[in-house]
Amino acid sequence: LVLKKVKHRLVENMSSGTADALGLSRAILCNDGLVKRLEELERTAELYKGLTEHTKSLLRAFFELSQTHRAFGDVFSVIGVREPQPAASEAFVKFADAHRNIEKFGIHLLKTIKPMLTDLNTYLNKAIPDTRLTIKKYLDVKFEYLSYCLKVKEMDDEEYSCI
């Protein structure tokens, strides 16, 4: 009985990391649905992180492509102004306008997508870590409560067996 009380006092005062390393904690929580949801949240966070990194590189490439279209538009415009034949000049000016419009719509698309990417980054960098911390705190408190209940039950069982 005394040894069990000493063991309970040691486990109560240990940090969760030390108790995990010694294999003295978390056995109660291994079937907890919240732990599985936390693991699912981690996988989702990794997926979204990869998605945002890929999207950022894709948007950079798209921006560079838009700038290339604008440069083509500028070149076609210069050619159109210098072209002596009216039909060819008009065609080059239309090509220039088309390429400049492609650049304009590309920039509009980037301005539309950027807030979405910012919101996703906020979710990844603020909401997920906050949720993770809250769940870990909850699991620590739940573990302490269940450990206390187990300790009380063991002590009651010991007292009944001594009587």
Image: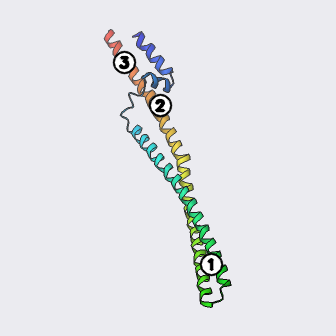
Q: CA distance from mark 2 to mark 1?
A: 69 Å
Q: Is residue 25 left or right of residue 60?
A: left
Residue 69, how many percent across, how many down? 59, 71
Q: Secondary structure at mark 1?
A: helix
* Residue 27 numbered tag: none
Q: Quadrant of residue 108?
A: bottom right
State the scheme by which the image is colored: rainbow
Q: Quadrant of residue 5?
A: top left
| Residue drawn at 52 percent across, 56 percent down | 55
User: The C terminus lies in which quarter of the figure?
Assistant: top left
Q: Residue furthest bottom?
A: 86
* Crowding near the residue tagged with mark 3, few <14, some 14–19, many ≥20 C-alpha atoms within 10 Å: some
Residue 18, how many percent across, how many down? 49, 23
User: Is tag 2's residue or tag 3's residue first in the polypeptide sequence?
Assistant: 2
* Crowding near the residue tagged with mark 2, few <14, some 14–19, many ≥20 C-alpha atoms within 10 Å: few
Instruction: Return the residue at label 1.
Output: 76
In the rendered image, the vertical position of residue 118 relative to residue 37, given as above or below: below
Instruction: Return the residue at label 3.
Output: 154
In the rendered image, the vertical position of residue 140 relative to residue 116, given as above or below: above
Front-most of residues 149 and 33? 33
